Every structure is written in C-alpha cells, then in structure tokens.
Amino acid sequence: METLILKGSQLDKAAEFIRQGELVAFPTETVYGLGADATNEAAVKKVYAAKGRPSDNPLIVTVSNIAMVEKYTEPFSDEAKALMKKFWPGSLTMIFKLKPNALSKTVTGGLNTAAFRFPNNQMTLDLISKAGVPIVGPSANTSGKPSPTTAQHVYHDLNGKIAAIVDDGPTSVGVESTILDMSVTTPSILRPGAVTKEDVEAVIHRPVIDELHHVGAKQTPKAPGMKYKHYAPNAQVYIVDPDDDWHDVVAWIQKNPQPTGVMAFDDVVKSISWPDNVDVISLGKNAASAAHDLFAELRDFDNHPAYKIIFTQGISPEGIGEAYMNRLNKSAGQMHFNQL
C-alpha cells in the first residue's frame, strides 16, 4: 500500500483508517507510536506483522481520557488516581488489572493486565477521540531498531506496511514513557523514562521497586522492552563508561583504522583530536539532551553502512540518565569498551 503522511488538518482521514482496521503511526511527546484499534483483534495482529514483533511482547493501550481506561480495568487505587492527576497526560504508562475478557489476549500478550498511556500530544488525543476507540501504541519502527522520533524515521521503516503517518514534527522527550506496574502490591517501574522513581515516590509517599527491567527467555514480559533486544542499529554499539579514558578509545581506533562512529557529550567531542576515520556526533551537554538525541543519532549511523562500530558515552543512571542508560545498554547488548 501507499503510506500517506498526514498533517493535523487531516485527522479525520487518519481516524477513518483506524476505524477501518488499518494502521496509522502517530506522534507523542516521547516517540512515534504505531496505532490500531485496540478493540479490533485483526487490526492488532497487523501491528505485530508490520513491526516483526514477537507475539508475547504486550502492547500499550493509548487513550485520550481516563474514562477509556476505566472501561477496561478494575477500579483504580487512590495512588493510581493521584499519579493520573500529576502525570496524565504525560510520559507515564501504568499497568492495571483488567476486567474479565476486557481486551484481546493479542493486546495483552496473554496476561490479565494491560499498560495504558495518556500521551501529552494534542494531535494524537484528537485522533483517538475522532476514532472513538483506544489504540495500541508500540513504537512505530521495525522491531529491535532504534525508536522513531520523527515521521521520516517511521516512513523509513514502515513505508508500504501501514496506511498513514500523522506528522507532528520531532518528539520533545526522545525516549519512551516510564512504565509503572500498578497491578502489584508494591508499584514497580518496569521501564525507566522521563518520569523518574523519585517523581513517583513523591506522589505516592512510599518506595517503589526499580529493579525489574528484564525477564527470562521463557517468561512473558508485562511491558515492552523487558525481554528482546531493542534500539539496535546495524553497527555494534560499545558503551564508554564514565571511568574509561577516551584517549584509550582513540588509541584503539588508531590501531583499527575502519570507519568508526562516536557519540559523546560536547566536552568530550571538543577535547579530543579525533582520527580521520571517525564520525563524531555530539549528544549535547547533559542527560536530557543525550536521551532526546540517542535514537535519532543511532538511526543516522544506519544511513552509513560502512560504520560497523559506534562508541557511545555512558553516564551515571540518575534521573533521566537512568532511561538513557537503559536504552543504551539494550542498544549495545550490554557491550562495553573495556570488553574489547
């Protein structure tokens, strides 16, 4: 099919595609999502096919109001209500227990829970309202590749596989939402994002668990990103840890004169005399800029297949730095410069 790129003035057309069971990519403040009617099992199956996504990797359900969530879930706790008041619309996804047979097992990965997201993007909220149904919303990319932060990234991966892309320019956050499991006794962060552990604890006034980012090969993940390799470009990424010396990285590159990528903060970029075989990309000055730019810059290297290795600066996993390092570790497959 021909994949259309639609503007905000064309949301009626995008909503009609959703109602017809077609796939439409949509913008959020974090990354672009791939939308389909969450109540239409055949449409949801198309999402897995378009992305090449494993069938036991559950999908986030994206909504335009809290009433949409209430229709499918058991009653909210007071803590959940407080978190909604603080962070919705915004970059917090919450997992709730479902009413019996409320959503297809295709959406939930066979679980009796589902993750719900109320994004902070008016264009997408209008799209959902016009469609009249919640939409599933995994990242709009080929499964395993860096998530898309522009409509052009989506077009690169999914042109011909989906009906349309709603273009609202580059996203503002750049990494996916925080996923918080509210279906368990102690709320647990299953994927870090812009809403941090400290942010959540300040609202609910008790500790949350923040150590459950991975599951085993035979387990079904409760949230995306917990099981399979994600965010990986064609080149192998190696993390340069904070206690590594970048001059050692340069020495390695000089001994291995192949085209090599480097992604680092401004101070590192400016302080090193880089060999001619290196393409250096700045990640800005801080963790927020690094998180915002990570996926886009990894994708940029994919446009230059000669690069087989990318050295990327690691940072302390604090605040949004935790989300950045979570994505970077998955992109690198846990590979570090000191392993070379």
Image (spheres, grey):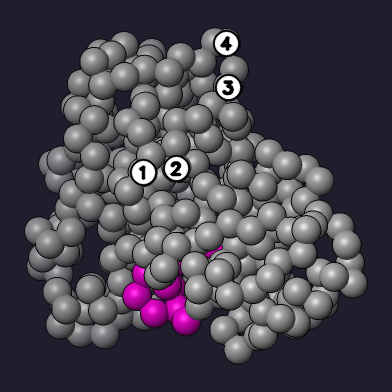
Q: Position of residue 61 (x, y in %)?
A: 34, 43
Mark 4 — residue? 1
Tag 1 or tag 3, which sits nearer the N-term? 3
Find out whether residue 325 is within the magenta segment.
yes
Mark 2 — residue? 149
Give the image quarter of residue 220.
bottom right
Tag 3 or tag 2, which sits nearer the N-term? 2
Tag 2 or tag 1, which sits nearer the N-term? 2
Q: Nearer the viewer, mark 4 or mark 3?
A: 3
CA neighbours of label 1 inside 10 A, class few (<14), some (14 to 19), many (20+): some
CA neighbours of label 2 inside 10 A, class few (<14), some (14 to 19), many (20+): many
- Mark 1 secondary-structure assignment: loop
What amino acid is labelled 1 in the image? Thr
Front in this rendered view, residue 278 or 217? 278
Mark 1 — residue? 171
Tag 2 or tag 4, which sits nearer the N-term? 4
Name above or below for residue 48 compared with residue 165.
Answer: below
Mark 3 — residue? 159
Tags 1 and 2 touching, CB below 8 Å: yes
What amino acid is labelled 4 in the image? Met
The residue under the point 24% across, 30% down is 123
